[in-house]
Image (cartoon, helix red, strand yellow):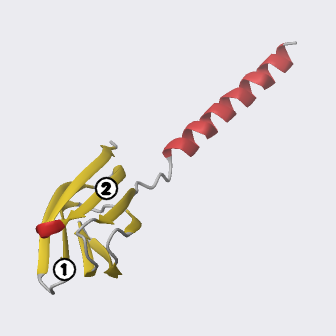
Amino acid sequence: MTGRTGAWKLFLSVFVSATILANTACHSFHVDTTIENRTGAAIQLLEVDYPSASFGVDHLDAAAVFHYRFQVRGSGQLTLQYSDATGQQIRITGPTLAERQQGQLQIVLLPGGKAEFHPQLSAQP
């Protein structure tokens, strides 16, 4: 009976160690971003700059939604810019992001060159 109990304890120990390793090693932190165009018109050349990189889209129709997933390297403020329907360049400053943050970020583009940022981000140690 002792041999069987020892084998079971060894198996359980290996299983728990493997589970902990799988849950802590190689975790990639991502921010799932949604940009909603509620400006009332199509916009052009949307670019979102975040620490160490950027993303964007050439055209975003009125009421359209754009999704993008990125990973923050370093820390700094998010900015976005686009050309509105009249060709005016709009630049908006958003929240500060830090490396190892993850979660969701909703950006709502509003009329008059305004935007709302709704971050639901958690920082990981």
Q: Residues within 10 Å of mark 2 (few under 14, many from 20)?
A: some
Labelled pair 2, 1 in contact (Cβ < 8 Å): no
Decide which of 69, 19 is in the foreground and name it: 69
Mark 1 element type: loop
Nearer-the-camera pick, 102 or 75: 102
- Residue 98 placed where, x, y %? 24, 54
Label 2, label 1: how many angstroms apart (C-alpha)?
20 Å
Classify the position of the N terminus by image quarter: top right
In the rendered view, tell whether residue 122 sits above or below residue 51. above
Residue 32, label in figure:
none
- Which residue has dot 1 on it? 84
Q: Which residue is mark 2?
A: 106
Label 2 residue SS: strand
Residue closest to the eye, 105 or 112: 112
Q: Position of residue 24 (x, y in %)?
A: 49, 43
Does label 2 or label 1 sit earlier along the sequence? 1
Please determine whether, in this image, residue 33 is positioned above or below residue 59: above
Residue type highlighted by circle 1: Asp
111 lies left or right of 24: left
Q: Height in image: 51 above or below 60?
A: above
Q: Quadrant of the C terminus?
A: top left
Left/right placement of residue 57 relative to residue 92 reads: right
Q: Could you tell me residue 124's position as x and y percent?
A: 34, 43
**Label 2 is placed on what type of residue?**
Gln
Give the residue displayed 23% in from the left and 69% down from the top. 39
Residue extending farthest to the right is: 1
Above-or-below relation of 51 to 46: above
The single residue placed furthest to the front in the displayed view is: 40
Residue at 83% over, 13% down: 2
Residue most extreme to the top: 1
